[in-house]
Amino acid sequence: MARMTHFLHTADWQIGRQYGQFETEDAAILAEARFDVVARIATLAAERGVDAVLVAGDVFDTQGVSDRTIRRLFGAMAAYAGPWVMIAGNHDAALAESVWSRAAQLGCIPSNVHVPLRSGVVDLDSANLAVLAAPLTQRHTYDDVTQAFDAMETQTGRIRVGLAHGSVAGRLPDTIDATNPIAADRASRARLDYLALGDWHGCLAIDEHTWYAGTPEQDRFRGNEPGYALHVRIDGPGAVPLVERVPTGKYRWLAWSETLSLPSDAQALAARLAELRAEDVLRLDVQGHVNMETWEALQGAVDQAAAQVRALLPDLSGLLLEPDEADLAELRASGYVGEVAAQLQALQTDPDQAAVAGEALRLLLRFQRESAASGAVK
């Protein structure tokens, strides 16, 4: 009886990615996480004893990564001594002079790592696996590079697996007129038992023979199920693959958009913030209007959350301060200070002046409150 072939499918490692929107410390840790997840994939491959690991493009985020980064990447793969097959994607296309040519010049690609730079078959005899590889040789193309698979011959009885990087026509949410197109029925046209794809950063089945693995470590604020590697088992040629999604990611990226109108809304948001974990990366956008007490409580909750998560990007610029009766009493609304406060409150509705006006109004309220407290002490 023929032995089942099984392998890991992963993609979009984006090694060397920069996170300029974050604080320096957070950006460095998020960049380091991309090496860490490669090491976890290598360990997973070794523990499960797979026949190969297939990496469907965008191993590197840019051609300009440092030599040290290239060496570190291949070092992170060391736990799995079996065969790796990795192809170039649009971020690390196999140009005449590329990150791949530098890796070869550095002599740091191990002998068990196959990096085909042109379309062709990588035959893994010990795994009974023929990998039909279609590396990208330019960043953008309007030709379907997987069309070559249709005519590729492989040894009789081999499991035929395609490895490609691009956009399956008409099947991804936001890729109208996308470059690097791939026919949705390529697996059947090319008699593939499995088509391992990269480019879409979420884990996604196109059909039972065609999958995107997604990035193994989430790297953007999009809830499209990133953070997995796929363990694929195929009993033999023509069999339907059994695909297991294996969690690999460490950080959870969240994007919250909140509108506040009542103090209870802010309290509910503060409660959600308190439940965040150390592995969370949050982008928070808050709109609405609150009084001074609620604004200060919310700011405290945001500051506390920033101390407990990996990274927090808060935007409270859309949150308008509306003094309540207690606030207005502190401002002595009948006097000059009250008139200034009313003007600042009105200016908050001007997009060009909202941020400055809101901050000025908060400072005015705080100053008035502290002055009142000081007077009471005297």
Image (cartoon, rainbow, N blue to C red):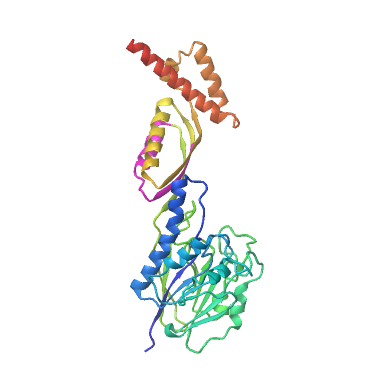
Seen at 50% across and 27% down, the residue is 359
Where is the N terminus found, in terms of image quarters? Answer: bottom left
Q: How many discs mark residues in the rendered view?
A: 0
Seen at 37% across and 38% down, the residue is 304
Residue reaching furthest to the right = 142
Question: Is residue 281 found inside the magenta-colored segment of the image?
Answer: yes
Question: Is residue 10 found inside the magenta-colored segment of the image?
Answer: no
In the visual, does 267 lie left or right of 115? Answer: left
- Say whether residue 55 is visible: yes
Seen at 33% across and 72% down, the residue is 47
Nearer to me, 237 or 29: 29
Name the quadrant containing residue 39.
bottom left
- Say whether residue 324 is visible: no
- Across and down, in percent, residue 245 comes to 40, 66
- Across and down, in percent, residue 294 comes to 40, 29
Rendered view: 363 above or below 238? above
In the visual, does 153 lie left or right of 237? Answer: right
Residue reaching furthest to the front = 106
Where is the C terminus found, in terms of image quarters? Answer: top left
Rendered view: 1 above or below 314? below
Seen at 39% across and 56% down, the residue is 250
Query: Which stretch did the figure color magenta?
Result: 262-286
Rendered view: 21 above or below 89? above
- Across and down, in percent, residue 357 comes to 54, 26
- Across and down, in percent, residue 136 comes to 60, 69
